Image (spheres, rainbow, N blue to C red):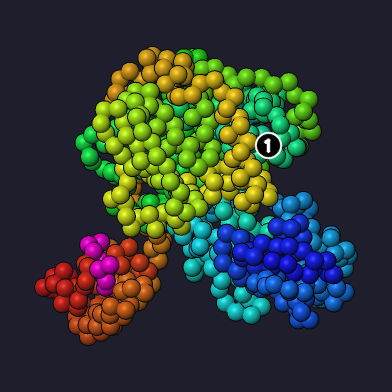
């Protein structure tokens, strides 16, 4: 297709989604603050204005056509874009020097590109609320209402925990009822952070805790995840480096770390254990499909949305927690150091790993999780040039890993590593793969013992919801919350878009090829760990395995309608959620209140409203002294309260 752009005839892709993408493909980048190719078109920021056949339109919402005449740099368009930027900046917290996005903020970049040195409009103060209740920090004063976080959370991840609220100049992005993010069903994947063009969303900075540990003289031990090294190469422009991980080891030793291990060793351990777990389930045809459990955002997603499938999750801990447990419980004894004296620091591409380390069942193992961006900050403030650092190998015994273990850093890596173990121990005679859609792969595997199974590899939690409709077709499912896997984690450096993630995955594949070990079974130190420390099956299960429990999707918030002080009372809680409302919960509530007021039980029965009892399929729902009554009626509630009521 041929169009004319500023007097030049250009050939563009006729199948391009819109004019903005068509021009991007031929090297013309139109300014934009709210456009993401992975989600629906929003057209809110208006920065991508162009002139098409004499009319000003947004290029993100305009489909190109043959013979289109486009102008992208007229004085009028330049003036409009500059005015838009000034209006945004007038309502924006411009404390750039203390902002997490300083130097990588699109708004900051465009202000520089357009030469904005003063704002003609009066500043409009925004609600300056900062939410630090979770690993993801929200600062509403820096939000420009682009909607990127809202659409990524809803359309890509299928979580939908944030949305627009209020109207006009009071519009803001927030959670339901302004609930702190840490108390919602957010899975802390950090994809909202990855795509936020400003500093409205960032990751909690925990570097001060590392400095405190180093100052206290503890034995600080580090471990580095596979996806971290690829992003570090990208940030410091060392793209062809094959020993980046080893340079990072040397750097951390310079900073005061006693030992530095490779999380890929933990990946070998997890895959070895998970492969045996899966083979046993496959033979017995129980708890299938088996879900991988390495991704903490995915695990929390299941706990909130599919609690009935929790038995299907692999009970093997993630590489971070499995290796951390071995370091704290096994390695500490070998070197004669109390586990309390070891301060274990994990460098991860993932924001959800910060949450994982603080889970009740994992607490006390990994003392601190730092994202790739925090590691970058550590390198920059040290003023050390990584190019000049002489590489050092990871410390033994947890510094050797296989190609398959290193592959955990990208989508498909866990499945591939499990398959390598089965290939070594059982034998694979046939394998066939297909890609029905972006982010989803299917695998048909035949083992030498005659067993056959079908696997699915998925990235992006939104795609999982579709997969849930036909789970009976699969025996093992790998899920990574972030697009392209851990290389696209929420803790990775900016930019963190599709093109960058693909490049990181490519670097990781190249690095994998250098490894001489292919399968975890070939890892001498892993074999030795099993022979010396994990021989007892019960002890091994206690160390390497864990369990999960359902989580409420919404925090329980009671509305006091007829409160009664003291403990000598009966309590009735009526769900006021949408599903229960449509099934008559408000009518039921009114009847109960009237009954209590009109009878002689007032002062002995309190009536409360609550938001959600997580049983929407059997509405209306009522709790009577903690007992759930499904499909409740007025008569059912009275019967449960007893004859004296």
- Place of residue 290 in the rendered image (x, y in percent of width and height, measured from the top left): 33, 42
- Place of residue 556 in the rendered image (x, y in percent of width and height, measured from the top left): 38, 63
**Where 7 falls versus 139 (above or below)?**
below
Observer-nearest of 127 and 47: 47
Tell me if 295 is positioned left or right of 114 in this view: left
In the image, what residue occupies the spot 32% across and 79% down? 582
Which residues fall within the magenta stretch?
617-628
In the image, what residue occupies the spot 74% across and 37% down? 236
- Quick check: is 603 in the magenta stretch? no
Q: Is any part of residue 208 visible from this angle?
A: no
Q: In which quarter of the image is the C terminus?
A: bottom left
- Quick check: is 621 in the magenta stretch? yes
**Where 608 falls versus 93 (above or below)?**
below
Observer-nearest of 230 and 255: 230
Q: Is any part of residue 160 visible from this angle?
A: yes
Tell me if 435 is positioned left or right of 147 in this view: left
**Where 570 falls versus 340 (above or below)?**
below
Q: Mark 1 points at which residue?
A: 232
- Place of residue 496 in the rendered image (x, y in percent of width and height, measured from the top left): 64, 49
In the image, what residue occupies the spot 28% across and 43% down? 288
Observer-nearest of 149 and 478: 478
In the image, what residue occupies the spot 53% across and 40% down? 410
Query: Can you name the residue that lies furthest to the left here?
Result: 643
Residue 8 placement: quadrant: bottom right
- Place of residue 541 in the rendered image (x, y in percent of width and height, measured from the top left): 32, 29
Residue 568 placement: quadrant: bottom left
Q: Is mark 1 on a helix, strand or loop?
A: helix
């Amino acid at each position: 297709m041929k169009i004319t752009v500023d007097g030049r005839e250009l050939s563009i892709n006729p199948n391009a989604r819109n004019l903005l993408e068509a021009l991007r493909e031929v090297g013309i980048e139109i300014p934009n603050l709210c456009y993401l190719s992975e989600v629906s078109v929003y057209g809110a920021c208006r920065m991508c204005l162009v002139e098409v056949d004499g009319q000003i339109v947004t290029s993100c919402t305009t489909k190109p056509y043959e013979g289109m005449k486009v102008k992208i740099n007229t004085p009028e368009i330049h003036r409009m874009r500059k005015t838009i930027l000034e209006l945004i900046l007038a309502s924006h917290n411009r404390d750039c020097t203390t902002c997490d996005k300083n130097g990588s903020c699109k708004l900051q970049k465009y202000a520089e590109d357009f030469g904005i040195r003063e704002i003609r409009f009066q500043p409009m103060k925004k609600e300056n609320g900062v939410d630090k209740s979770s690993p993801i920090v929200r600062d509403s004063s820096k939000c420009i209402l682009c909607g990127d976080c809202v659409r990524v959370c809803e359309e890509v991840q299928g979580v939908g925990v944030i949305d627009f609220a209020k109207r006009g100049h009071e519009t803001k992005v927030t959670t339901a009822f302004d609930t702190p993010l840490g108390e919602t069903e957010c899975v802390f994947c950090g994809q909202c952070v990855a795509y936020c063009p400003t500093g409205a969303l960032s990751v909690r900075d925990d570097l001060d805790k590392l400095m405190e540990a180093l100052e206290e003289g503890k034995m600080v031990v580090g471990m580095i995840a596979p996806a971290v090294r690829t992003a570090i190469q990208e940030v410091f422009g060392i793209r062809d480096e094959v020993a980046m991980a080893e340079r990072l080891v040397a750097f951390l030793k310079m900073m005061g770390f006693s030992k530095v291990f490779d999380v890929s060793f933990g990946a070998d351990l997890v895959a070895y254990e998970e492969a045996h777990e899966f083979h046993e389930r496959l033979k017995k045809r129980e708890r299938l499909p088996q879900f991988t459990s390495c991704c903490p955002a995915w695990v929390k997603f299941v706990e909130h949305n599919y609690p009935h499938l929790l038995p299907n999750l692999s009970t093997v801990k993630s590489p971070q927690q499995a290796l951390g447990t071995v370091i704290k419980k096994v390695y500490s004894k070998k070197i004669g150091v109390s586990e309390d004296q070891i301060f274990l620091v994990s460098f991860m591409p993932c924001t959800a790993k910060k949450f994982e380390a603080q889970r009740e069942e994992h607490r006390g193992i990994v003392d601190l999780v730092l994202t790739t961006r925090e590691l970058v900050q550590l390198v920059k403030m040290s003023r050390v040039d990584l190019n000049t650092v002489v590489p050092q190998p990871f410390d033994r015994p947890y510094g050797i890993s296989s190609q398959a273990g290193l592959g955990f850093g990208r989508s498909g890596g866990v499945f591939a590593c499990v398959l390598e173990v089965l290939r070594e121990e059982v034998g694979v005679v046939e394998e066939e793969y297909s890609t029905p859609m972006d982010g989803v792969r299917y695998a048909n595997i035949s083992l030498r013992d005659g067993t056959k199974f079908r696997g699915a590899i998925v990235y992006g939690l939104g795609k999982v919801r579709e997969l849930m409709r036909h789970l009976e077709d699969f025996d093992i499912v790998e899920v990574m919350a972030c697009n392209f896997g851990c290389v696209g984690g929420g803790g990775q450096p900016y930019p963190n878009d599709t093109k960058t993630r693909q490049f990181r995955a490519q670097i990781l594949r190249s690095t994998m090829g250098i490894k001489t070990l292919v399968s975890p079974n070939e890892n001498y130190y892993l074999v030795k760990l099993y022979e010396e420390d994990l021989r007892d099956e019960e002890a091994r299960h206690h160390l390497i395995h864990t369990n999960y429990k359902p989580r409420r999707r919404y925090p329980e918030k009671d509305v006091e309608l007829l409160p009664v002080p003291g403990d000598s009372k009966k309590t009735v809680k009526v769900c006021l959620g949408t599903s229960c409302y449509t099934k008559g919960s408000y009518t039921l509530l009114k009847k109960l209140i009237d009954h209590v007021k009109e009878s002689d039980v007032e002062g002995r029965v309190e009536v409360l409203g609550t938001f959600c009892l997580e049983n929407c399929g059997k509405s209306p729902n009522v709790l009577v002294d903690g007992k759930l009554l499904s499909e409740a009626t007025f008569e059912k509630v009275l019967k449960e309260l007893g004859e004296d009521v």
